[in-house]
Image (tube, coloured by chain):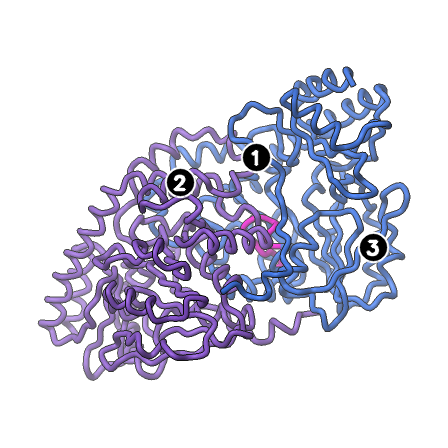
Chain colours: A purple, B blue
Amino acid sequence: MIANRMKSLTPYVPGEQPQDGKYIKLNTNENPYPPAPAISKFLKEMDITNLKLYPEPTSVKLRTAIAEAEGLKPDNVFAGNGSDEVLSFIFYAFFDADFGPVLFPEFTYSFYPVYSAFYNIPFTKVSLKDDFSINIEDYLNRKTTGMIIPNPNAPTGVYLPINEIRRLLERFPSDRLVAIDEAYIAFGGESAAGLINEFDNLLVIRTFSKSSSLAGIRLGYALGNEKLIQALTTAKDSFNSYPVDYITQKCGELAVKDAEYGNDIAERIIATRKRFVAAASALGWEILPSMANFVFAKKPGRSGEEIYTRLKKQKILVRFFNKPGISDFVRITIGTDEEMETLLSAIKTF
Amino acid sequence: MIANRMKSLTPYVPGEQPQDGKYIKLNTNENPYPPAPAISKFLKEMDITNLKLYPEPTSVKLRTAIAEAEGLKPDNVFAGNGSDEVLSFIFYAFFDADFGPVLFPEFTYSFYPVYSAFYNIPFTKVSLKDDFSINIEDYLNRKTTGMIIPNPNAPTGVYLPINEIRRLLERFPSDRLVAIDEAYIAFGGESAAGLINEFDNLLVIRTFSKSSSLAGIRLGYALGNEKLIQALTTAKDSFNSYPVDYITQKCGELAVKDAEYGNDIAERIIATRKRFVAAASALGWEILPSMANFVFAKKPGRSGEEIYTRLKKQKILVRFFNKPGISDFVRITIGTDEEMETLLSAIKTF
């Protein structure tokens, strides 16, 4: 009864989401600040009679707001049920075994190999440099169906400068997709969205989960040439015509229109990150340079699992990855100053 | 750049969703009444700080509420981003070209062939009887990977009695899925959910879009043996771990817990349907017997498209299907008594 294609699946395992509220949650890169105040006002004043109707299937107002913020056209924007769904449609629409494997970094978002298995697409993990940075040369001169990298990368937090992405696009085959997953771009990096009008094979993926504090509503989007967006729309309309609900479309639109609030909380997180990195380094921790709302950190002599377990006992959740090469590290989300002080007190006892 | 698998797609086209509010919308089978009042209270009182966190990924409270209402266990319930997403995962998880084509009725939900193309699954359309009813004999003794039928069927509204579904399950291969899509079951039919503990190969699919007036939040679910539910969960977690957002989970839970309200509005729609069918029949319309919140109707001498066009000019939207065999019909959603009176006045001029 189970289809053969199910045999190759090893599902993605998201970070723990304890429902009892007793933990300081620094494990799933959520934003510690609330979403834009206009969202609260909207929800309080909303007429629930609107919910009886199907949502507008193309999220046109939301896409128009995003396009205006980016200096693009609505036809350059695709919206989905979280950037995870957007990424899934990207794997479906652009990556094909007949063209070669999809390329992504050895240590990166662990959903990429899962999507590959879901659609039966071979992949090649490309090594990082010793300092965990990406070397664009390693993605060139290969038989490939396309590539995807997060920038900054996760779980490392390491950023690839925009001029490197430009060099990559200039040399990567123009008929193969380059997907830049910018889930964490708001925390100090420069976006590749400015290159979209120049490179027809570039897709930039964003999420409202991190910088907009809206992980709970599930909203993400892709920016790119209108032909790429059309293909994503065709995939969506062959899977589920209305993935983005009425409330989510509206909340996303309000968050985009209050960019100042989003920038403000991103600045606060960047400042907290700096303070935390300085203080933890002073305690002998080694931390990769991060441009994200998390840091990838290790304490020499301890495994990531050991750090995770000790912190969990103190009601602090971080994430570790039981993989050779990164098993010494934990990924720590940047919370409020107060939360990071509590974490610092805890790690002082190590 | 576009993957070869995209070549075979012809996306589903949902009914029009005009955004100007100027139409009487009888084209997409939405409920004319607002959702349960508890949902309004929840949205007004909700703390938006909750939205900064990812939703609970398994929708456990919602699934528990549904299970209690159905006399099942939470492990018998799978929740998704609309029943369209649930259906998509069903096609992925259970239908396999190696086992044979998937079977569904000749005239049915037009998303089924779209899912088939999305996952490259062959299908066979099984003819309906002359009265548009389903003959279960036609689904037996065939090489097949499984079958899916809506009950009541759409766009016909015709209901297959529960004893026929039992007879089908008794004779269909026990290692092949039987999916009963009960989007419209609340409007007079008897659910097959009571057969789940008896038949391991039965999945029943439901939506909050119709009987719960919640098309705007995108929520659907499947009921079945826990092994089937596990397979759907594996598919979901390999596509998008958090398809059902925080607000949607909560609204669904509140709707399930106010079953009385849901039953009450369903009763009102059934009563309106009866009155409308009597009045339209008296005007010479031919209407298939419906157990849904819509009717499939024709006016001899006119095409479905002609009826659609004339009504649209009068600001009433219905849906027609430009397919041989049903091109004379329009599908008319049952609205409020007032809306149906307006429609009756309009068709009197034909």
Count of labels in the image: 3
Where residue B164 sits in the image (x, y, percent)?
A: 85, 51
Q: Is residue A339 visible?
A: yes
Q: Which residue is drawn at 79% across and 38% down?
A: B327
In the figure, A210 relative to A278: above or below? above
Residue span colored magenta: B76-86
Q: Do labels 3 and 2 share a chain?
A: no
Q: Is residue B90 visible?
A: no
Where residue A142 sits in the image (x, y, percent)?
A: 41, 79
Q: In this view of the protein, which residue sits in the foreground, B182 or A191?
A: A191
Where residue A89 sits in the image (x, y, percent)?
A: 50, 59
Residue B43, image quadrant: top left
- For label 1, the SS is loop
Magenta highlight on residue B85: yes
The residue that label 3 is drawn on is: B126
Q: Which residue is drawn at 24% across and 82% down?
A: A130
Q: Do the residues labelled 1 and 2 touch (CB within 8 Å)?
A: no
The residue that label 1 is drawn on is: B17
Where residue A53 sits in the image (x, y, percent)?
A: 56, 34
Magenta highlight on residue A61: no
Q: Local crowd at mark 3 within 10 Å, few (<14), some, or many (≥20)? A: some
Q: Which chain does the numbered disc 1 sit on?
A: B
Q: Distance between the residues labelled 1 and 2?
A: 18 Å
Q: Distance between the residues labelled 3 and 2?
A: 43 Å
